[in-house]
Image (spheres, rainbow, N blue to C red):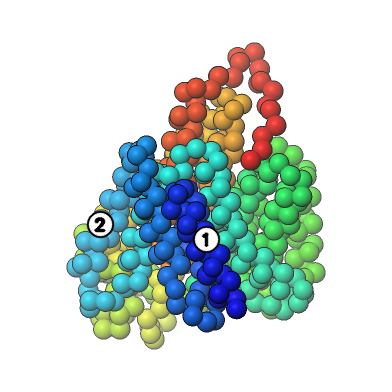
Amino acid sequence: MRDLVFTSLFLVMLGMALRRAHLGLMLWAWSALFPPNDFLYGFARGLPFNKLSVACTLAALLADRRRDVSLDPLMVLLLLFVAYVSLAFAASEAPSGWGDDLYWRLVKVAIASLFIRFIAVDRLRLYSLIMAMGLAVGTGAVDEGLKFLVTAGGHHSKGPQSWGDENITAAIVLMVIPLLIYLRRYLALPLLRHTVLAVSVITVAAVIGTYSRGGFIGLLTLGGLGFITARRKLLVLAVIAAGAVVLVEASPASWFQRIESTGHAEQDSSFMGRVIQWKILTLMALDHPLLGGGILANTYPPVWQSYADRLGSELTFIPTPPPTKPYASHSIFFQVLGENGFPGLALYLAVLWTAFRTTRRVQAKARLSPSTLWAADLAAALRVSLLLYCVTGAALPIPYLEFPYLLLGCVSALARIQAAESRKAPRRSPLGPAPIPPTSI
């Protein structure tokens, strides 16, 4: 019955998406970040909901004669990065078929980023897309966060199966928190604002419930940025203090033991296993500096063994125990380096750097007019989300995770919208700031 009801509703939404490309884009992003297949158990479990959303969005975009498919530097760099990864993938040390899932995930999400730029051409469409993304991740985060709170810290948050392990769940949930804070600020109805605030608090509990040390570092980063950029610092400090008290009361002793081990990384077998993989990825890049070893080549047993045998005599500046078996890379930077070589890493860093610079530029220009202050706030939120991705991703194997690439598309779309609105918006008076009218969506 659940499958029938959901599939019927989804087909209705697909019909609407065929007429409005931005509705298809929302459906695409939602089904990518929170795949409904994980929660269906009958005939609908095998249906390609996300692919159907993609097809309807593409059809609606092609039918729109007013579409503008121009690119900006951020999207050009993203396409160059995907093209370079494709070359490295074709020359992979691993056999054909190894790493296919990750490669095609990158290709699909890069296309989604382009679609965001092409379709989210005004404030309402971009806001609606971010709301769909917040709803997708927030639903899974609230489910896990409530379980953690109700069980007084006994529940171990893992998130939907498609997200991956608890560490990746922590990273995904952290990235959505700045977007939820932005959404709350521009909601017109008080009930909705209070609801989004409650969701934001519960998502923090979900991050804590993952027992992820990277997630904890991300929370510290988020709290520090919130305090530095807040106008009402005492209020933010009080909220952080209250959250710390709740954390101490709700979290079991095992959580504190897990976090405390961060300060003794050299004694942690899990961390040292990551160092081993970083060494192997570095050797792979040194052996193949232009194209690297290809996606997930370091996890292919014969390739892994050939590099593991060399660790006793190479890269010995950090002592590590003898390698035992292949592990995930546990670093977006080392993974991109080992899989795509030094040029691939340079392109990857250029994409991230351009995204940060774009949000800075948009924020600076949007502050010049009261009518575009919303763009300044969104640029700041997107920048914090991407920064949290970099912080948590430094110790996680998520260089091809969908969410940050969707954020890149939002950055590109925001820059385009802000530029268009700034051309017709009045500048702020040199005598002082103009009054800001109430804003609502």
Q: Position of residue 19 (x, y in %)?
A: 45, 49
Residue tagged by mark 1? Answer: 12
Instruction: Please rate how many residues cluster around mark 2, counting C-alpha atoms within 10 Å: few if below 14, some from 14 to 19, many from 20.
Output: many
Q: Position of residue 20 (x, y in %)?
A: 46, 48
Residue under the point 38% across and 73% down? 277
Quadrant occupied by the N terminus: bottom right
Q: Is residue 7 above or below residue 177?
A: below
* Sequence-first disc among 1 and 2: 1
Residue tagged by mark 2? Answer: 84
Mark 1 secondary-structure assignment: helix
Quadrant occupied by the C terminus: top right
Q: Residue flagged by tag 1: what amino acid is it?
A: Val
> 403 or 425, which is in the foreground?
425
Q: Is residue 194 above or below residue 52?
A: above
Q: Position of residue 221 (x, y in %)?
A: 60, 54
Of the numbered discs in the image, which one, if any, rests on residue 109?
none
Q: Position of residue 76 (x, y in %)?
A: 31, 45
